[in-house]
Image (cartoon, rainbow, N blue to C red):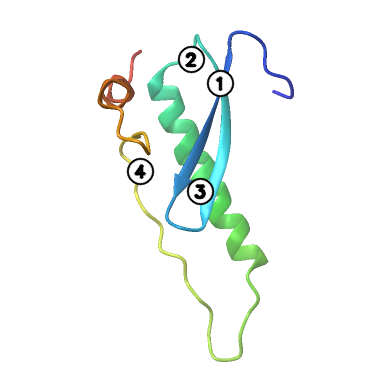
Amino acid sequence: MDTLTSEARQVRVYLDKDIEFTVQFHASQTCGWLLKEVQSRYLETLQASKRAEPRTPGGIKKLKRRIIVALKTTDQRESLDYWLTQLSR
């Protein structure tokens, strides 16, 4: 999705302190789809960072994989946070 139409939305996702990315989606896609997309992009980002990480003589820094079970807003908007838990919407 290169260009955003009037139906398209964009969400900025922040994970841990070093991982952030943008997910684009259409209004017809569900919160369940958005959660799966975030999980997928998170794994892609972890794998990319492992490949790009320089190997040190003393050892390799291992990134800890976190399990994402839900999404929430950074500014704690309760109504939107509730909506994000409704995976079929």
The residue carrying mark 4 is 68
Q: Are marks 2 and 3 in contact (CB under 8 Å)?
A: no
* Label 4 or label 3, whichever comes before in sequence order: 3
**Local secondary structure at mark 4:** loop
Tag 2: residue type? Answer: Gln
16 versus 39 height, above or below: below
- What number is the disc on residue 60? none
19 versus 84 height, above or below: below
- In which quadrant is the C terminus drawn? top left
- Compared across the picture, whether 19 is left or right of 81 comes to right
The residue carrying mark 1 is 25
Q: Residues within 10 Å of mark 2 (few under 14, many from 20)?
A: few
Instruction: Work out how far the residue at label 2 is from the one at label 4, CA to CA, in angstroms.
Output: 19 Å
Instruction: Work out how far the residue at label 1 is from the one at label 2, CA to CA, in angstroms.
Output: 7 Å
Tag 4: residue type? Answer: Ile
Q: Determine the residue located farthest toward the right in the rendered image.
A: 2
- What number is the disc on residue 29? 2
Q: Which percent across, then down, holds residue 44?
A: 57, 48
Q: Residues within 10 Å of mark 3 (few under 14, many from 20)?
A: some
Q: Nearer the viewer, mark 2 or mark 3?
A: 2
Q: Quadrant of residue 25?
A: top right
Q: Residue at x 63, y 8 (%)?
A: 6
- Compared across the picture, whether 76 is left or right of 58 comes to left
**In front here: 55 or 74?**
74
